[in-house]
Image (cartoon, rainbow, N blue to C red):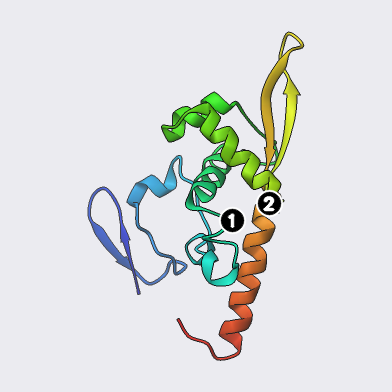
Amino acid sequence: MLWLMNDENTTHTADRVASTVIWGDLETRNFLKLPKMFAYLGHYDGRVGREIQPRHLLLVIALASRKFRTEPIIASWTGIALGLGVRPDTVRRWAYELRNLGLLEISATTGPRGGDGPNSFDIEPFVQLLEAADEKWRRWRESGGSE
């Protein structure tokens, strides 16, 4: 049985696919889903806590929130910084740290008048890190591990 929250009340239903709903109806609008591996990544990749810091995870989440279907992620340092409440130089530093770790690809774009435009970001290398960590977790579970 699964408890689901909505605006009106709590409903109890057994005929829905099992999932955990935390944010109620917000999950049906303007919502970003994240793999649980974000919270467990440090268990499966020794770089977390050393090279990969919480600021990097936050930046990946901010970039992922800008992804639309198959379109590239296009954003300015200022736009990202405003959303996170930090300075553009801070966001730029975090992004280049991730790039130097091989976890983020950054490409310059050309603006409408031929000058520098916002950057294009590819988080696929980070997604691959999460997939590798998830695979380690699955092997651990299959070998009899427990949480």
Above/below status of 97 relative to 88: below
Quadrant where the image shows the C terminus: bottom left
The spot of residue 57 in percent (x, y) is: 52, 50
In the image, 121 versus 1, the foreground residue is 121
In the rendered view, would you say 35 is above or below 143?
above
In the rendered image of this protein, does residue 33 appear above or below residue 115?
A: below
Characterize the local packing of mark 1: few (<14), some (14-19) or many (20 or more) Cα atoms within 10 angstroms.
Answer: few
| Residue at horizontal 51 percent and vertical 55 percent from the top | 34
- What is the x, y in percent for residue 4? 33, 61
Q: Secondary structure under badge 1?
A: loop
* Residue 73 marker: none
Q: Which residue is mark 2?
A: 101
Q: Mark 1 highlights which residue? A: 51
Check if mark 1's residue and mark 2's residue have beta carbons within 8 Å. Answer: yes
Horizontal side of residue 68 vs 146, given as left or right? right
Name of the residue lying farthest toward the bottom: 144
Relative to residue 79, is residue 69 depicted above or below?
Answer: below
Question: The disc labelled 1 sits on which kind of residue?
Answer: Glu
